Image: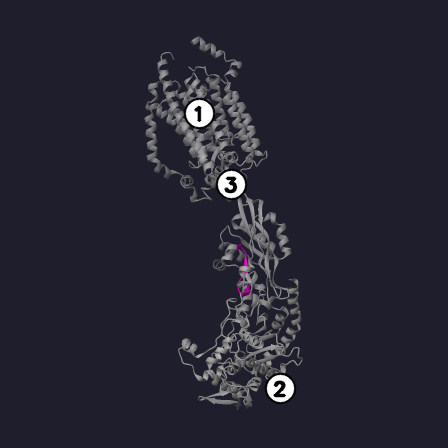
Amino acid sequence: MINSSSENVTKLNSINRRMFITGSLKFFIMIGLVSRLFFLQVKENKKYLTLSDKNRIREWKLAPIRGEFHDYFGNVIAGNFEAYQLHLIPEQIEDFRYVMYRLKDLLELSEKEFQKIVKKKNAIKPWETLIIADNLNWKKFSKVNNQLYDLNGVKPVISISRNYPYNENFTHIIGYVSQANEKDIELNDIIKKNFVPGLKVGKIGLEKSFEKRLIGSNDIERYEVNAYGRRINQLEFQKGERGKTLKLTIDTEVQKLANELLKDKSGSISVMDIYTGDLIAMHSSPSFDPNLFVFGINQDDWQIIRNNPMKPLVNKTLQGNYSPGSTIKPIVALSALENGIIDTNFTVKCNGKTEMYGQTYHCWKKKGHGFVSLRNAMKQSCDTYFYEIARKLGVDKLSQTAEKFGLGKKVFGDLFDIEKNGLIPNTEWKKNALGKGWLLGETIITGIGQGYIQTTPIQLCLMTAQIANGGYKIYPKIIVNDKENIIPNDKFTPLYKNPKNIKIIQDAMFGSTNEVMGTSYRSRIDDPKYRFAGKTGTAQVRKITEEDRELDLQTFEIPYEERDHALYIAFGPYINPRYALSILVEHGGNGSTTAAPMAKKLFKKIIDRHFLRQSMNNKKYMEI
Amino acid sequence: MYQHTRLKDNNFGLFQKFKNFDYVLFFCILLLGFISLIAMYSTDGGEILFHTKSHFTKLIIFTLMMVLFSFINIKFWFLIGYFSYFVVIVLLIWTYLFGIKSSGSQRWIDLYFINLQPSELMKIFIILCLAKYFHRMKLDKINSIYTILTSLIVILLPMGLVIVQPDLGTSLLIAISGVAVLWFVGINHKYFIYTMLGFLLLLPFIISFLKPYQKLRVLTFLNPDRDPLGAGYQIIQSKIAVGSGGLFGKGFLKGTQSYLEFLPEKHTDFIFTLFSEEFGFIGSALLLLIYAVIIYRIVAIGASSRSYFAKVFCYSFGSAIFVYITINMSMVLGLLPIVGSPLPIMSYGGSSMLATMTGLGIVMSAKVHSQQAIA
C-alpha cells in the first residue's frame, strides 16, 4: 500500500475525473427528461387530454324512434312496438362457438337459422354488431336474460320496431320499412347520419318518400368505458328527437272496404275529395302484409308474393298503365263540346258498326243503338257516336283537354318514385316517339279509350273529380296539412271554356247510372243522399278478332289473361257532389257488371262517413 | 497512520455507526417508498388490495434489510464479492434449468416463500464482483488484454444466461452495470469508443438476430402509429396518460388512463406513467428530484469513501441506478423502444427491490464505514 501510494493517487484522479464526466452527462440527461416531461405535460397537454377523453368516453347511438302514420281520424296505421332483440359483438366474445350453441339451445334455433347467423357473423367485421334475434317473444327473451351470466358479451336490447296494424290495407300507400342496407346508407345522408346497426328505413311508398321527417334522431348515450370497452358509468344522455307523425287524408274504413271489394281480384280503387284533393282511399289489389318485411322476409313468403300472377308488388293505382276504355268518353265529349265540334243536338246513327277509311269499327252493341245524341251515347256508351266525334275532333284537340284534366302526367309529382305518367297520344308525340305519321284510324279508337292512350287509375280519379267539381283544377294530396308541400297558385282555376259543357257531361254521367238503359243502371242508388253519377269502361286487353265476335263468349269462358279490364269512374252525391272515385278490376270482364257495383257499396260508405269527416274538420278549427 | 487505522477498525461502535449514517439518503428512500405506496394504492383502484399490501410488506422488510446491511462492515462486502457473483450465476443456471415459466419466458425460481428473479440481483452483484476485481489492480495492468478479457467474460456470462430466458432488457441493464465499472476503473476510453462504433456497424446484423417481437418493438418505437391497437398500444397509451396529466395532474385516484385500464403493466414498468398522470408535471419533476438527490448522495458517499472498492461500487451503482431510471422514463415517455426495465423502488416486484435495496445497503455501509480501508 505504501509503495503504491502515488499510483493510488493516479487511480483516484482517474476515477474522479471520469465521475465528473459521468456526472455532467447525468445532469444533461436529467434536463432532457424534464424537458420531455414539460413538452408532453404542459405544451402538448391539450392534445393528450383530448386523446385521453377519446379513449375513455364512448358514444352509443340508439335507434331513433320513427314517426308514425295516422289516418284522418287519428288511427295508427304505422306504429311502433317494443321488439326484444339479442345483439352481440363478435370481438368481445371469448368463445363464440360456445355462446352460439348455448343460444341455439335457449332460442330453439333450427340448424338452418343457426347456420344463417354464423354466416352473417363471418360477413361482418368483428367489431360490428351482430343481431342474433330481432324479434323474440317475451318468454324466450326472459329465458336468455336469466342465463346472461353464462353468455358473456350477449346484449339483450329492447328496440323500437315498426308495426302495421292494418296489415295489407295500406301497403301500397305507406310501403314498409326494413333493415337499412349499404345502398340506403350511401344514397341518403339522413340515414347515414342516424345509422345504427339494425336501423329500419323506408323501402317503398311514403315510408321511403318521407324518410327525412319520419326517421327522427338518435338518442346518444355517453359512457366512460375502460380499455376493454366495458361501460363504467354514464356521463350523459342526450335525448333524440322522435320522428314526425304524419297524418294521412285516408279514411281507414273506406280503405278497408276497398280492400274487401277487391279481395281475390287484381285491381285498384281510388277515392278523392273533389274540392280538397284529399285521397280518401287508394288501394291496389292484391296487396301483401308489410309486417313480413320489417325483420326481413323469409324465402317462402317472398316466393309466394313474387310468383303471384296477380302481381301484388305492383302498385296498380300509380304504376298501372291501362287503356281507359269508355271512361275516357266524358273527356272526348267534353273536348268536342268545348271545341264547338258538336252541340247537344248532334246525333249519330249507330248500326252496330261503321266503316271509316276502309276499316270497320264495331260498337259494343251488335244491333246498334239507332240514332243517338250525346246524352244517350254517354248513357249507353255508344262507341259509334264517339268514333264519329273523335274523327271530327282530331287527336290533338282531344289530347289537350285530356291533359288539362290531369291525364298523361304524374298526379303526385315526385311523391311516389314508382308513379307512371300514362300516355296521352297526339300527332307530335307519335312522330317523335315512333317516327311515324298519325293515322286517322288511330284517332277513332282513341275516342273510345283504346290504342295508344294509357292512363293510371289515379289519373282517372283526378279527371273525374275535376269534372265533378265543375271543372276546376285541384291538386290531390295524401298528407294532412303538409306544410312542405306547396300547392301551386293555379288551384281552382277553371279548366273549361264554358261551364255549361261540364254540366252537360255531369248530366250525361247521371243518365248513365240512374236512367233505364244506362250502362250502370243496375248499380244505382235511388236515395238522393247517396245518388251518384258514373261512367263504365271496358278496356280490351287484346284486339277482338272477327272470330271472337262471332263466338261472343261470356266473360268466364275466356282465359283469365285475355279477359277485358273492367273500369268505372263516378262522383257523388249527384246533388252537391263531394267525392269522386275510380275503380279498375284487371281482367274483370265488364265495367258495368264488375266495377260499377263496387261503386255502389263505396258511395254508401263514403257518404255515410262524410259528416264524421266534416266534424273532424270542425273540431280542428274549434281547437284553434 | 497504521495505528490510527487499526484503532478506527475496532472503534466502529454502534453510536459511531449511527452518527455516520446518511440520513438524507435514508429520508429520500423512505419518501420514495411512501410515494411508491401511494402509486400502488392507486393502481389497486383506491383500495388496499394485493399489490399495495404486498408492496408494503416488501418495502418494510427490504428497508430493514438495507439498514441492517449498512451496519455490516464494508470489508464483508468486499469479501463476498466473488462469492456472491458465483452464487447468482448458479441461481441463473438453476433458473435456466428449473425456472418457472411465465408468459413465454423463464425468469423466476421458486424459493417457496418468494419467487426470485436472479437476473435482477445480478445487476448489483456484477458491480460488487468487478469492483473487487479492480480494487487491487495495478494501474498498468488495468488496460491489459488479460484484464479486459476477464472482465468481459464476467459481464458476458450472466448476460448470456439472461438472454436465453429470454430477457433482453435485463441483460442489457446487467451489461450497463458492468460497463459502468469498467469505465470508472479507467479502462482506456478508446475501447469504449471502438466498441460503440463497432456496435453501430453491427447494428443491422444484430437486428437480424432479434426475435420478431423485438423487431416489432423497434419498429413500433420508430413509428408507434403503425399499429396503434397492437404493438404501438402501450407506448401510445403511456404518452396519452403522461400528456393528459398536465401541470398539476388529474388528481390522486383520478387518472382515467390507469383507472380505466388503458395503461399496460401499470404496477411495474409503467408505474411512472400512472404517477405522472395523477400528479402532473410538478409531481413528476419532484419525483425526478428525489431520484437525483439519491444519486447525488450515492456519488457523494463514493467520493468520501476511503477505499477504492467502495468508491468504484458507489460510482458504478449510482450510474447504474441513473441508467435504470433514464431507460424506464425514456421508455414510458416514448424516447426509447419498450424494454422491460423497472423503475427502482417505485415498480412492483420483489427481486428488483431486493437488488436495489441491497445495493443501497452496501452504499450505506460504505458511508457508515467510510474511513475503513481495505487491504
**What's under tag 3, amino acid-wise?**
Phe
Tell me where the magenta segment starts and ends, as one range.
A194-206
> In the visual, does A200 lie left or right of A20?
right
Q: Residues within 10 Å of mark 1 (few under 14, many from 20)?
A: many
Q: Residues within 10 Å of mark 3 (few under 14, many from 20)?
A: many
Q: Name the mark on residue B262.
A: 3
**Disc 3: which chain?**
B
Q: Mark 2 — residue?
A: A516
Q: In terms of secondary structure, where does tag 3 sit?
A: loop
> In the visual, does B215 lie left or right of A193?
left
Q: Is residue A354 magenta?
A: no
| Residue B199: x %, y % from top left | 35, 33
Name the residue at 47% across, 11% down.
Answer: B8
State whether discs 3 and 1 lie on one chain.
Answer: yes
Q: In terms of secondary structure, where does tag 1 sit?
A: helix
Cβ–Cβ under 8 Å for marks 2 and 3: no
**What's under tag 1, amino acid-wise?**
Gly
Looking at the image, which residue sits at the far top? Answer: B3
The reply to whether residue A109 is in sight is no
Q: Mark 1 — residue?
A: B318
**What's under tag 2, amino acid-wise?**
Val
**Disc 1: which chain?**
B
Name the residue at 51% across, 25% down.
Answer: B29
Quadrant of the image occupied by residue A272: bottom right
User: Disc 2 versus disc 1: distance between alpha carbons?
Assistant: 123 Å
User: Disc 2 versus disc 3: distance between alpha carbons?
Assistant: 90 Å
Comparing B124 with B158, the one in front is B124
Comparing A157 with B56, the one in front is A157
In which quadrant of the rendered image does the C terminus of chain A lie? bottom right
Q: In the figure, B366 relative to A327: above or below?
A: above
Name the residue at 42% across, 17% down.
Answer: B307
